[in-house]
Image: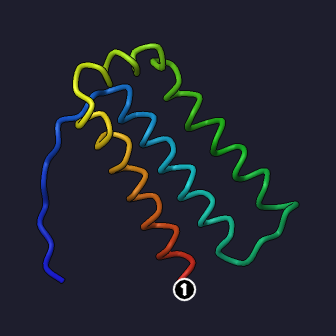
């Protein structure tokens, strides 16, 4: 498959929420790489969620305004990093 690199200009706060969600997904993939071990995996996943989402939620009040100003780029701002997080999870789980 051929690929192409593109650059996107997306709303800051929305994309930071997407980046945090993508990081949480990646942490889930890493935690589950050796199978699900609740005692070990749940704390890692929760810690990642709190650390990543906590920072992103600092500007959450701006998300509705950013979405109203440019809904298409706002959606891309969330979807792109989440999709990259899913890609990492799939790659880790295929091992």
The image quarter in which residue 74 lies: top left
Q: Residue at x 43, y 51 (%)?
A: 82
As helix, strand or loop, the secondary structure at mark 1 comes to: loop
Mark 1, Cα crowd under 10 Å, few <14 / some 14-19 / many 20+, is few
Q: Residue at x 57, y 50 (%)?
A: 24
14 above or below 22? above
Taking depth in this image into account, of 74 and 6 the one nearest to the observer is: 74
Q: How is the image coloured?
A: rainbow
35 above or below 21? below
> In x, y percent, where is residue 55?
53, 27
50 above or below 69? below
Q: Residue at x 42, y 43 (%)?
A: 19
**Residue with the most extreme right position:** 39
Q: Is residue 53 left or right of residue 4?
A: right
55 above or below 61? below
Q: Is residue 25 left or right of residue 45?
A: left
Quadrant, the C terminus: bottom right
Q: Which residue is mark 1?
A: 95
How many labels, in total? 1
The image quarter in which residue 1 lies: bottom left
Q: Residue at x 42, y 67 (%)?
A: 87
């Amino acid at each position: 498959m051929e690929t192409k690199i593109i650059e996107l200009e997306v709303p800051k706060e929305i994309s930071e929420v997407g980046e945090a969600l993508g990081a949480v997904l990646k942490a889930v993939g890493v935690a589950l790489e050796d199978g699900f071990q609740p005692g070990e995996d749940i704390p890692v996943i929760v810690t990642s969620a709190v650390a990543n989402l906590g920072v992103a939620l600092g500007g959450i009040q701006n998300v509705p305004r950013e979405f109203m100003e440019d809904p298409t780029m706002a959606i891309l701002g969330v979807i792109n990093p989440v999709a990259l997080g899913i890609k990492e999870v799939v790659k880790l789980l295929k091992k």
